[in-house]
Image: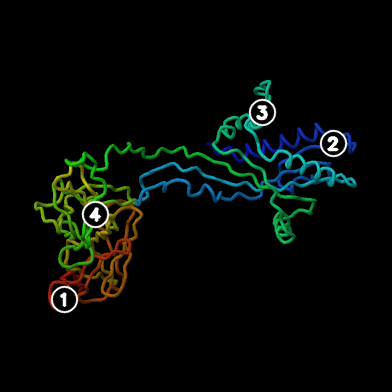
Amino acid sequence: MSSALALAGVTAVLRDLLNDGLINHNVAGAIGTAVTVSVMPPDRVVPSNGSEASQLNLFLHKVTPNLGWRNERLPARDSSGRVRLSDPPLALDLHYLLTAFTAADLHSEILLGYGMQLLHENPVLTREAIRTALSPAPDVGTTLPATLRALNATGLADQIEQLRITSAPLDTEELSKLWTAIQAHYRPTTAYTVSVVLIESTKTGVSPLPVLSRGPVGPVGGRERGIVVRPDLVPPLPTIETVEPAGKQPVARLGDTIDLKGHHLDGTNRQVRLISDRFGIDEVLAATVGNDPGLIQFVIPTARASDFPATIYQMVADVIRPGEPVPRSTNHMALVVAPHITNLPMNTAVDGSGTATFTIEFTPDYRAGQTVSLALGSAEVAAHGTSVQTASLDFVVPNAPLGNHLVRLRIDGIESPVVDRITIPPTFLDARIQIS
């Protein structure tokens, strides 16, 4: 595989190929002037003074994914996006413009003809040609520019696929769009594609051990059991079907029992993991006592209010099933942890200007970066001093409406419960502030 320097390395090898070919064919002698090969954007080839030298210019104008390699391996990450499973290469096709610049008659045609001939005669960049171009012999050491010295480490010569050069004709409309975007005067141009550059990832992934057996060996015949078919529509794997916070609420509060209902949930070492990529949380909570195959219960303790902010968590349960030596994980489900106001109901009085000032205490802790407000009846009030982690916030309400108001604390759009859903019909909880 190649490194991230591979794009520059391919350009350097092509320039070396064209430059050597022009020298070997004595093109400079044929047109009576020196000839160079540049690798600049076309709008920068001609200097500001307008003196245009005879030269070929190679410009990398587009990079696209290689269709043959983009699905070559398994997905790079697991379903959570956190664990790297494999290291698929970044497979790219490079698209070049080969342009002839000159101020003399017929020189552009001569240069472009030689350039196209050289690329036609060398459809594959051999490993020897790449090593020669990027590691010239004899070693010129520090006399090379720093950029060219760095290209020794591209790995182009050692990647699995060789680099192939193919002509990629562009129609008039495509050429017009390109040169309009470049904002340069058009010159005789042809297009080529170099495929494929394989850039290797530098991050490590999971390397699983080989499978030794496909199941226990049967007593008759001594063969491995392999795949077993069960005549049942229910999968024989631990599965969570519903998440039910306490009190029939749609959100969970710290200290309340949360029910995970499903099937095949019985076993030992039952536990629940809560994951939040935003806050970097991956915490394990033990399940409460019990071994019901259809139910796992757990509690987020209020003593850990600083560890579990109000947010949406990925939740997965782990259990060692009967007769199995290793734990199995259930499917992932979402769990919304909401704030809970702990100092309601309360009474507060307005000052001489009609402003009410009060403090709301709650669990779990507010964290810096979260948005927070208080719904006082139907009005929304912003909090004061929300730059540090805290379990209480001050609110100032100018021209505060007098009376008894229902209150909801809203953190990142998640509101504290205000409805008692057990009663029939539902009623409001006593989450009120009396302003007098």
- Image point (20%, 70%), residue name: 418
Give me the disc on residue 229: 4
Q: Is residue 193 above or below residue 378?
A: above
What amino acid is labelled 1 in the image?
Thr
Q: Secondary structure at mark 4?
A: loop
* Crowding near the residue tagged with mark 4, few <14, some 14–19, many ≥20 C-alpha atoms within 10 Å: few
Q: For the residues carrying marks 2 and 1, which lies nearer the camera in this image?
A: 2
From the image, tell me which residue sits under label 1. Answer: 427
Percent of width and height locating residue 41:
71, 47
Q: For the residues carrying marks 4 and 3, which lies nearer the camera in this image?
A: 4
Q: For the residues carrying marks 1 and 3, which lies nearer the camera in this image?
A: 3
Q: Secondary structure at mark 3?
A: helix
- Image point (26%, 46%), residue name: 226
From the image, tell me which residue sits under label 2. Answer: 27
Relative horizontal placement of residue 57, taking residue 434 as reference (left or right): right
Residue most toward the left?
Answer: 290
Query: Which quadrant of the figure has residue 416?
Result: bottom left
